[in-house]
Image (spheres, rainbow, N blue to C red):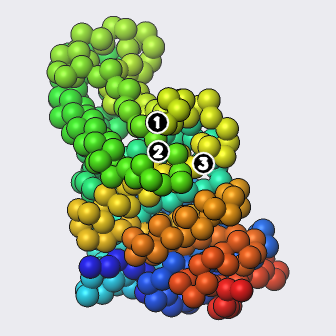
């Protein structure tokens, strides 16, 4: 069974006033000068999954000109032999809506339909910056295996925000806290279990023969097994801080270069990126083993800083998995090893508007 995006249509989305492009399931190369609209196209595809996309932009930030019209993304996604029509759209001042096969749907339903992962240049510093980005990365990995993880995470965060509001307002009546803390305990336990199960799956899918350094991933989470009474006991301390100080929202993902027992934060920039690529490939292998298809992969400028050997190895791994990966770069020469195994499109920009032209790789 294969998973691939067959058709994509954009309307008033960033630099793409109108774009319509067909894909045949092979990896897709998008090349052109900086500012030509390559990442904008990847961002549109990322919005066919739950959440705010690879840039985490608010809906109104995505609107092209004229801004009053809003934006729309339409797609045909094939899951095995079954095609699905997806539409997501937003107008000025409104949240985005989702339709699947003509019916209103939740964003969680997008996750049930297709797993999706991405790497962007902003993620090159993932291992050395704040833990929030690593939690988001881990939760995106989890969604591939457990689409309902998004609902558990949202339920936890919603209850925590309300609890934090009570703490800041100095509310002491325990009746106001009990239900919220129980909700945090129920959904928070599910979040932690999902995260740990995903790390176990990735470890089993690691490829020691890969030219990419394998990452031993671990989760630092000091949440007590019985979170609700711990939250109740810590109310006075949390009130002094103005926020909740224990729970899965404070967990952190860490990585160790297995062969050298070196923390990712102490690796070079190139090694850190290679560890991320190894993790993405392990996730794709694990999903392929579980469901028969790899996730959709959005790899923005991923080849630019790889040597020739690792670049070719990445392309071979994607093709072996049958993964539809969307890769961007400034020139077609970065993708020569893919040859006829990939579709290629050149993007150009004129007057702030992007245009796609299908080409052949050299």
Where does the C terminus fall, quadrant-wise?
Answer: bottom right
**Mark sitting earlier along the chain (2/1):** 2
Residue at image coords 44%, 84%: 25
Q: Position of residue 66 (x, y in %)?
A: 68, 78
Callout 1: 10 Å neighbours few (<14), some, many (20+)? some
Q: Position of residue 164 (x, y in %)?
A: 38, 25
Residue receiving disc 1: 258
Q: Nearer the viewer, residue 31 or 174?
A: 31
**Mark sitting earlier along the chain (2/3):** 2
Q: Position of residue 70 (x, y in %)?
A: 56, 75
Helix, strand or loop at label 2? It is loop
Real-space CA distance between mark 3 and mark 1, rounded to the nearest whole angstrom: 15 Å
Q: Nearer the viewer, residue 153 or 96?
A: 153
Residue 313's disc number: none
Badge nearest the viewer, 3 or 1? 1
Residue receiving disc 3: 273
Q: Position of residue 29 (x, y in %)?
A: 61, 78
Q: Nearer the viewer, residue 224 or 235?
A: 224
Real-space CA distance between mark 2 and mark 3, rounded to the nearest whole angstrom: 11 Å
Name the residue at the front extreme.
209
Circles 2 and 1, Cβ within 8 Å, touching? The answer is yes
Residue receiving disc 2: 214
Real-space CA distance between mark 2 and mark 1, rounded to the nearest whole angstrom: 6 Å
Where does the N terminus fall, quadrant-wise?
Answer: bottom left
Circles 2 and 3, Cβ within 8 Å, touching? The answer is no
Helix, strand or loop at label 3? It is helix
Quarter where residue 173 is shown: top left
Residue 12 visible in the snapshot = no
Residue at image coords 59%, 31%: 265
């Amino acid at each position: 069974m294969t998973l691939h995006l067959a058709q994509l249509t954009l309307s008033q989305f960033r630099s793409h006033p109108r774009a319509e492009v067909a894909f045949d399931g092979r990896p897709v190369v998008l090349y052109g000068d900086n500012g030509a609209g390559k990442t904008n196209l990847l961002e549109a595809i990322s919005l066919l999954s739950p959440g705010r996309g690879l840039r985490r932009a608010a809906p109104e930030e995505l609107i092209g000109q004229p801004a009053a019209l809003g934006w729309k993304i339409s797609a045909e996604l094939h899951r095995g032999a079954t095609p699905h029509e997806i539409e997501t759209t937003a107008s000025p001042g409104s949240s985005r809506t989702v339709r699947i096969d003509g019916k209103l749907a939740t964003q969680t339903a997008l996750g049930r339909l297709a797993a999706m992962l991405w790497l962007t240049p902003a993620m090159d510093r993932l291992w050395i910056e704040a833990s929030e980005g690593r939690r988001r990365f881990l939760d995106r990995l989890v969604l591939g295996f457990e689409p309902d993880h998004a609902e558990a995470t949202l339920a936890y965060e919603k209850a925590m925000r309300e609890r934090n509001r009570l703490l800041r307002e100095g509310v002491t009546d325990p009746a106001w806290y009990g239900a919220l803390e129980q909700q945090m305990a129920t959904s928070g336990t599910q979040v932690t279990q999902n995260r740990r199960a995903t790390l176990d799956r990735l470890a089993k899918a690691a490829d020691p023969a890969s030219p990419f350094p394998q990452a031993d991933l671990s989760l630092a989470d000091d949440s007590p097994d019985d979170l609700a009474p711990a939250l109740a006991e810590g109310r006075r301390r949390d009130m002094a801080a103005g926020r909740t100080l224990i729970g899965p929202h404070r967990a952190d993902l860490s990585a160790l270069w297995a062969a050298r027992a070196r923390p990712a934060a102490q690796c070079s920039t190139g090694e850190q990126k290679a560890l991320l690529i190894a993790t993405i490939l392990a996730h794709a292998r694990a999903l392929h083993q579980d469901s028969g298809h790899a996730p959709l992969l959005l790899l923005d400028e991923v080849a630019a800083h790889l040597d020739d050997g690792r670049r070719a190895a990445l392309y071979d791994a994607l093709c072996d998995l049958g993964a539809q990966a969307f890769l961007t770069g400034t020139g077609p020469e970065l993708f020569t090893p893919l040859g006829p195994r990939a579709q290629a499109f050149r993007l150009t920009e004129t007057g702030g508007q992007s245009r796609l032209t299908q080409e052949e790789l050299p």
